[in-house]
Image (spheres, rainbow, N blue to C red):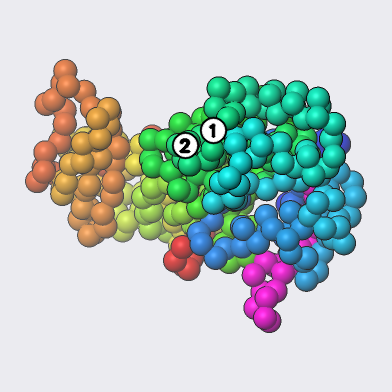
């Protein structure tokens, strides 16, 4: 069993030592993962990382080169898709254009020879759940993109699958509708009470809808965790840089702080003479080069030079202000030449506190919010 395989009594899917190759090229390597019943789990990663291949392996459209796919306690490697108790919603929705909404949703039940009264009841229930009951007689071309997507989900969910697989189903929608559908998907998943396995390359989408996120890169799992864990406690620079905006500082470990029993390290940051304390649970050797990761909202900007008793302060100059409504981003060039982005709330009642382009400023951060990681050079994502 691998490091990410955590079987529990509510586990619905187990991916055990999964590897997959096409034409001699390995696209998945040693994947171990347990997916829980009734959770919304998202595979997140850049194009080509293997996330859609994993979804196809669960669905039965591909067979792993090695390893096992276990669904509801049964090894399903040899089972075809229609015998796996899972349904898939594709990017294109794949609705039948000549059929009404009702008939599209009822199609699978009719193929399974479900009695007509049962079909009518189940289709009506699921259409009410996705708020499309008044549109049952319409054809797909008479619906909006969001409505078509809900029809595709209803058609998949009406068969009572154990798991619903969604392969970037929101990618064709505009930004506003996409955000609305993200909320609708999460609410629908809770109402249905079944497991959703979602694939996306959109970090914001993954963080906003998921119970857990699986971050992938080059056919491997980089990290599994809740959205908060992925965002606030990345396990590698690759995850930190891929998920959300980051500021990455260079530092050198000087040793453990004798005055801090909480695991703080004394370090020299960005070549500053003054030492700083870095809070971390990781172990680092004296003299080791590390990276200090801070999100834009973790940083603080001071327009006045701090006193000698203040903590670490990095001096720089404001290059750009980007207004975003309730917040604005401040782009700052440090004396070392490194650029930072700081996010602050816009206070229209005290505009004197807002830095201007060309201002000299001093940057610090909220103590304890830093993430300290080994110095490494991840491949671009």
Disc sitting over residue 41 in the figure:
none
Residue 260 visible somewhere in the drawing: no
User: For the view shown, which residue lies furthest in the left direction?
Assistant: 358
Residue 256 is one of the magenta-drawn residues: no
Disc sitting over residue 142 in the figure:
2
Residue 138 visible somewhere in the drawing: yes
Residue interval drawn in magenta: 13-30
Between 269 and 338, which is closer to the camera in this rendering? Answer: 338
Residue appearing at x 25%, y 40% in the figure = 329
**Residue 91 pos. (x, y %):** 55, 51
Picture layout, residue 211 above or below residue 85? above
**Residue 75 pos. (x, y %):** 89, 55
**For residue 108, what is the image quadrant?**
top right
Q: Is residue 264 left or right of residue 56?
A: left
Between 3 and 255, which is closer to the camera in this rendering? Answer: 3
**Circles 1 and 2 in contact, beta carbons < 8 Å:** yes
Q: CA distance from mark 1 to mark 2?
A: 6 Å
Picture layout, residue 122 above or below residue 249? above
User: In terms of secondary structure, where does tag 1 sit?
Assistant: loop
User: Total label count?
Assistant: 2
Residue appearing at x 72%, y 45% in the figure = 87
Residue appearing at x 37%, y 54% in the figure = 249
């Amino acid at each position: 069993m691998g490091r990410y395989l955590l079987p529990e009594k509510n586990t619905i899917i187990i991916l055990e030592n999964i590897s997959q190759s096409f034409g001699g090229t390995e696209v998945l390597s040693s994947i171990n993962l347990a997916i829980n019943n009734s959770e919304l789990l998202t595979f997140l990663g850049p194009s080509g990382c293997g996330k859609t291949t994993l979804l196809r392996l669960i669905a039965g459209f591909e067979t792993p080169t090695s390893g096992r796919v276990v669904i509801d306690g049964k090894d399903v490697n040899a089972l075809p898709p229609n015998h796996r108790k899972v349904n898939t919603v594709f990017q294109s929705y794949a609705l039948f254009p000549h059929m009404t909404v009702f008939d599209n949703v009822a199609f699978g039940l009719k193929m399974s020879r479900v009695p007509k009264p049962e079909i009518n009841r189940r289709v009506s229930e699921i259409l009410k759940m996705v708020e499309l009951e008044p549109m049952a007689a319409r054809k797909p071309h008479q619906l909006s993109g969001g409505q078509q997507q809900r029809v595709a989900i209803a058609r998949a969910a009406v068969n009572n699958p154990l798991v619903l697989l969604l392969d970037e189903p929101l990618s064709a929608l505009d930004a506003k509708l996409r955000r609305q559908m993200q909320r609708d998907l999460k609410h629908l998943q809770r109402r249905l009470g079944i497991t959703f396995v979602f694939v996306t390359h959109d970090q914001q989408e993954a963080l906003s809808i998921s119970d857990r996120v699986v971050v992938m890169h080059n056919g491997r799992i980089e990290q599994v965790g809740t959205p908060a864990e992925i965002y606030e406690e990345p396990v590698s620079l690759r995850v930190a840089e891929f998920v959300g905006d980051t500021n990455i500082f260079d530092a050198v470990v000087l040793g453990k702080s004798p005055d801090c029993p909480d695991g703080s390290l004394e370090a020299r940051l960005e070549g500053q003479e003054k030492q700083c304390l870095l809070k971390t649970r990781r172990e680092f050797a004296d003299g080791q080069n590390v990276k200090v990761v801070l999100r834009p909202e973790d940083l603080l900007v001071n327009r006045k030079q701090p006193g000698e008793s203040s903590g670490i302060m990095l001096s720089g100059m404001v290059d750009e202000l980007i207004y975003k409504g309730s917040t604005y981003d401040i782009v700052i060039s440090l004396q070392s030449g490194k650029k930072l982005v700081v996010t602050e709330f816009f206070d229209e009642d005290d505009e004197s506190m807002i830095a201007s382009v060309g201002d000299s400023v001093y940057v610090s951060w909220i103590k304890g919010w830093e993430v300290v990681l080994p110095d490494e050079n991840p491949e671009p994502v």
